[in-house]
Amino acid sequence: MSLTKRSLDKDLEKIVHVEAATRTMGSTVGSHGIAVIFLGLSALMAALLVGVTSDTAMVVFAAILGGYMALNIGANDVANNVGPAVGSRALTMFGALLIAAVFESAGALLAGGDVVSTISKGIIDPSLVEDASVFVLAMMAALVAAALWVNLATFIGAPVSTTHSVVGGVMGAGIAAVGFQLVNWGTMGAIAASWVISPVLGGLIAAAFLAFIKINLIYQDDKIAAARRWVPMLVAIMAGAFAWYLAIKGFKRIWRPDTATVAIITVVTFAAVWGVMRPLIRRQSEGMENRNQSLRALFRIPLICSAALLSFAHGANDVANAIGPLAAILSTVQSGDIASKVDVPIWIMMIGAFGISLGLFLYGPKLIRMVGDQITKMNPMRAYCVALSAAITVIVASWLGLPVSSTHIAVGAVFGVGFFREFYTKRSKRRREMVTRTGKALDGDDRPPLSPEVLQHRKLVRRSHFLTIVAAWVITVPSTAIISALIFFGLSLVV
């Protein structure tokens, strides 16, 4: 009798696994089917709007490639904006997908640049390319290589820079088409430096804000009074940073304010939000218990707003990674000349905007979980530090003239939060005194404290994910360059 029961349990378990695998397979097939329909619609739009010419097939193929790149940007890059909010439970996965899709599309369509540099931040000199058809093939090879690399990175669960992927693709195709003299090596050196600068700067700023929150909120006897004093200030800093960022970067298509105007906008936004948040936080905190769970609740709405604003800013700026080469191909095919900057038709902008949003919905949850939960554990306070760091780091880098990656900044901030927690948990005298006095862990939670022996060996950042992501960052540009060069040679033989 017992043997029969065990066999029955095994059979039932097999059925459950088969059903789960079937659901996963069905979901994957459905996602791929929707993606194929989107690429078909992109091709149809290009064919109808460009008209029947001798080069229509080339533009249609380029539109498919641009749509494929946009899908991959949505699957990989957008996770950085909403991942921490999902990991901290401030947003559900569906809520994050919806907010990111809406604000990514809005950023791309309303504030996306109407003039896009076709040579991706000046890494090659298009005047050295004598034949327009060679330039078109190089841009196609760059798009394919970048999209394939981001697709591979998404598959293995590594958030990589789509900007660096495009840069590597353009560089590799340019070298294959003309030679090493085509590359602006000074620009490439600055991009290589950003591999280190972006994540380190993002991590340091995020760690600094987390240290401030721990010292001034978490490890205070009266947490509610501390929250009423400091949370409005932290939210106002976030608002001022986004006001500065959006004034400089986000609305360049609509409005280009001077430095003095940007400074006034930033200060006014900071003051206004601080004035609004003080009574709001006071009312929200009335009746709350003096515990860390109450602090988390106060950060939830500002964190959701920051995820939306980050998505808007990302859509405004990074849509060029998908549509820049496509716009270059269209301009070159129609005019017969190679231009360093081109106007972007609205239909190309739509392919980029909706492709990013669709890629996020179909394939984004995997990377959202990676960034939000699998690198290190998040709560609203830690996630808020990541979002605030992302905004401020981009501002600092722009002020210093440094080319940085939003992906590297955000993921670096996640690493910074995790490694700082490891350091602070082991070495903070203030924390030890508070734990001894209250008998609680206080590390963002109200759990019993761990023993000193456990704390000494406790790792709060998963080293396997850390090494995988860093390795993917380092090899992104050379890998996409090699892939792009090989694709260019292949296309040259076919066309």
Image (cartoon, rainbow, N blue to C red):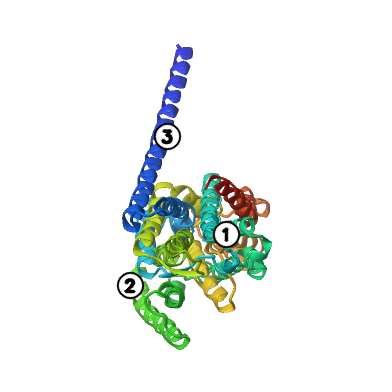
What percent of the width, then of the height, locates residue 150? 53, 51
Residue at far front of view: 54
- Residue in front for this viewpoint, 113 or 317: 113
Q: Amino acid at mark 3?
A: Met
Q: With respect to residue 429, does 273 lie above or below?
A: below
User: Which residue matches tag 1?
Assistant: 170
What percent of the width, then of the height, locates residue 287? 35, 67
What percent of the width, then of the height, locates residue 384? 47, 65
User: Which residue matches tag 2?
Assistant: 283
User: Which residue matches tag 3?
Assistant: 25
Residue at far top of view: 1
Q: Nearer the viewer, mark 1 or mark 2?
A: 1
Q: Nearer the viewer, mark 3 or mark 1?
A: 1
Q: Say few, some or many: other residues with alpha carbon within 10 Å of mark 2 (under 14 / 14 to 19 / 20 or more).
A: few
**Counting residues from the N terminus, which is met first, the one under dot 1 or under dot 2?**
1
Relative placement, left or right, of 50 versus 190 is: left
Relative placement, left or right, of 405 versus 314 is: right
- Which image quadrant is residue 428 in? bottom right
- Residue in front for this viewpoint, 425 or 225: 425
Instruction: Give the residue displayed 49% in from the left and 58% down from the top.
Output: 80
Q: Secondary structure at mark 2?
A: helix
Q: Amino acid at mark 2?
A: Arg
Count of all numbered marks drawn on residues in the image: 3
Q: Say few, some or many: other residues with alpha carbon within 10 Å of mark 1 (under 14 / 14 to 19 / 20 or more).
A: many
